[in-house]
Image (cartoon, rainbow, N blue to C red):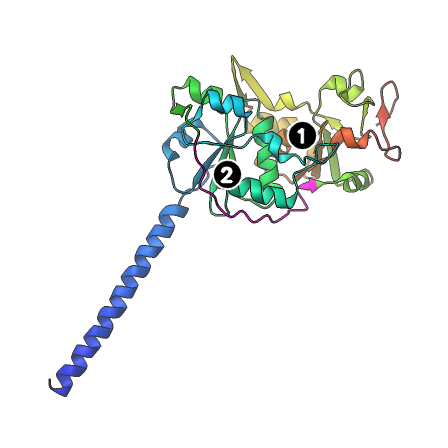
Amino acid sequence: MPADVGAAFNKGKRLGRLAWLATMAMIALCSTARSADLVLPDLLVDTQWLETKLGHPSLVVVDARAPTDYAAGHIEGAVSLPYTQTFASNSDYKLIVSLSRARALFSTAGVARDKVIVIYDSGEGTHASRVFWVLEAYGHRRAAILDGGFPHWRGQGLPHSIVPAVPVPSTFVPEPQVDRLAGKLATRLALANPNIVLIDSRSEDEFFGSTSKAALAGRIPQSVNVPWLRNVTRMGDVTRYKSSEELREVYAFVAGRKAIAYCNSGKDATLAYFVLRRLGMNPAVYDGSWLEWSVDAQTPKVLAGTIAP
């Protein structure tokens, strides 16, 4: 073979190899794009959006209800992750699950950084919002809640099943977000900070101390009562979130300040957390809530029958 022909042939082989490599890279990029092109329209998604995304490789649908509810019927392909598993088992005050347990819990459910997580419950919202908050507290940034939960989904005749889904295990790497979780000390310091507002998500009766799930009836001083039910509207057996306009009015008193929400045990308060996140605010949840605060003799309290802020 003449030298010039040989050189051209070798050059052609090199160009062919480069073209092949470029093609393979493009295929890999397209494959990655297909698995990562799922974009959440909002932190709250509707049944129509979710129906069109079922089966997407980047989607994990999480059922936060009790295992018995899941077994009786669930969204097709949804994995069972009861909200009760997000509480630490060794805590008297139902604190957040430990980092190591969170890693195991979410990894088993197939939750990973590149996955979009849509959570639902029986429609009350507080079970799904608890899982949502724990995910965000441990650094996951692509989670949403299904408006209306399973009752709304089932009522529209959308795909549901009694066959348990088998999660594809993943590797969930927790990255604790300190601004999403408020401990007792941070909550106490907040009382002296005008840039922080405390929100009591319990009922009015609990807020004013006429009833209590704790041994002591009362509230944290300076807290503002927004019962968790004010975030939602009941329509028959379906509970839906109020509009952003209505909720913005409900939480107008926050006025750009950081909000720390609490309840009895860190469940109902996560509904306020979720709503405030949707409204673009900067909330946290006081994990120990009133059950922890009320038994500490050193914490200030407004007890039943007393007059205080």
Taking 181 as reference, is 109 left or right? left
Secondary structure state at the residue bearing disc 2:
loop
Q: Residue 105 is drawn in which quadrant?
A: top right
Identify which amino acid the numbered label 2 is placed on. Answer: Ala
Which percent across, then down, holds residue 172?
54, 47
Secondary structure state at the residue bearing disc 1:
helix
Q: Nearer the viewer, mark 2 or mark 1?
A: 2
Q: Which mark is residue 269?
A: 1
Looking at the rendered image, the quarter that the C terminus falls into is top right
Q: Earlier in the sequence, mark 2 or mark 1?
A: 2
Q: Which mark is residue 250?
A: none
Taking 203 as reference, is 64 left or right? left
Identify which amino acid the numbered label 1 is placed on. Answer: Ala
Which percent across, then down, holds residue 169?
47, 43
- Dot 2: few (<14), some (14–19), or many (≥20) neighbours within 10 Å? many
- The magenta segment is 165-181
Name above or below for residue 287 compared with residue 35.
Answer: above
Q: Residue 298 is drawn in which quadrant?
A: top right
